[in-house]
């Protein structure tokens, strides 16, 4: 299946994402620190990044821009508890494929991840 990077400053959110997507057969690498997530992407292939928009040191949008520089083919799903039209537009302009509002809904997350990966030709079902 897919190599997924999940970054959220709330560890419980990364644990939840990991549990949901590992059950679907994906390899999920979870991070609470921006630097650790970017370092992982420097050394490892990432099919999909799931990024919270509000982080500790930088925004998820800034992390998305860095990750896209490293891996332009990488897909992205943005998470936010504070949805706005502006952040949605900016996320899409930086290459995000989808947007999910927190709290994370298991079915919505599974559906959006499946659609993103299918469109990218990364889902080998």
Image: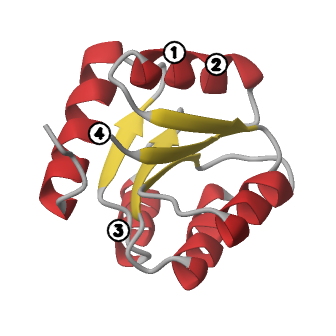
Whether residue 8 is visible, yes or no, is no
The answer for how far apart the CA atoms under marks 1 and 3 are is 26 Å
User: Residue 80, relative to residue 11: is it above or below?
Assistant: below
Residue receiving disc 1: 19
Tag 2, which secondary structure?
Answer: helix
Which mark is drawn over residue 113? 4
Query: If the image is split into quadrants, where does the N terminus sit?
Result: top left
Nearest to the observer: residue 4 or residue 33: 4
- Asked if the residue under mark 4 is in contact with the one under mark 2, i.e. CB atoms within 8 Å, the reply is no
Q: How many labels sit on residues?
A: 4
> Residue placed at 58% from the left, 76% from the top?
65
Residue at the spot of label 2: 15
- Cβ atoms at labels 3 and 2 below 8 Å apart: no
Question: Pointer 3: what residue?
Answer: 92
The residue at 84%/59% (across/down) is: 35
Q: Is residue 27 above or below residue 64?
A: above
> Residue drawn at (70%, 67%), measured in percent from left and top?
43
Gap in Å between the C-alphas at discs 3 and 2? 25 Å
Is the residue 50 above or below the residue 47 in the image?
A: above
């Amino acid at each position: 299946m897919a190599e997924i990077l999940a970054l959220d400053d709330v560890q419980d959110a990364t644990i939840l994402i990991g549990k949901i997507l590992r059950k679907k057969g994906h390899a999920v690498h979870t991070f609470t620190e921006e630097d650790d997530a970017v370092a992982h992407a420097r050394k490892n292939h990432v099919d999909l990044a799931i990024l919270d928009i509000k982080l500790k040191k930088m925004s998820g949008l800034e992390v998305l821009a860095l990750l896209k520089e490293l891996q332009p083919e990488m897909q992205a799903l943005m998470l936010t508890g504070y949805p706005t039209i502006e952040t949605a537009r900016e996320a899409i302009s930086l290459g995000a494929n989808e947007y999910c509002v927190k709290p994370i809904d298991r079915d919505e997350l599974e559906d959006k991840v499946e659609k993103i990966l299918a469109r990218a030709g990364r889902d080998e079902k």
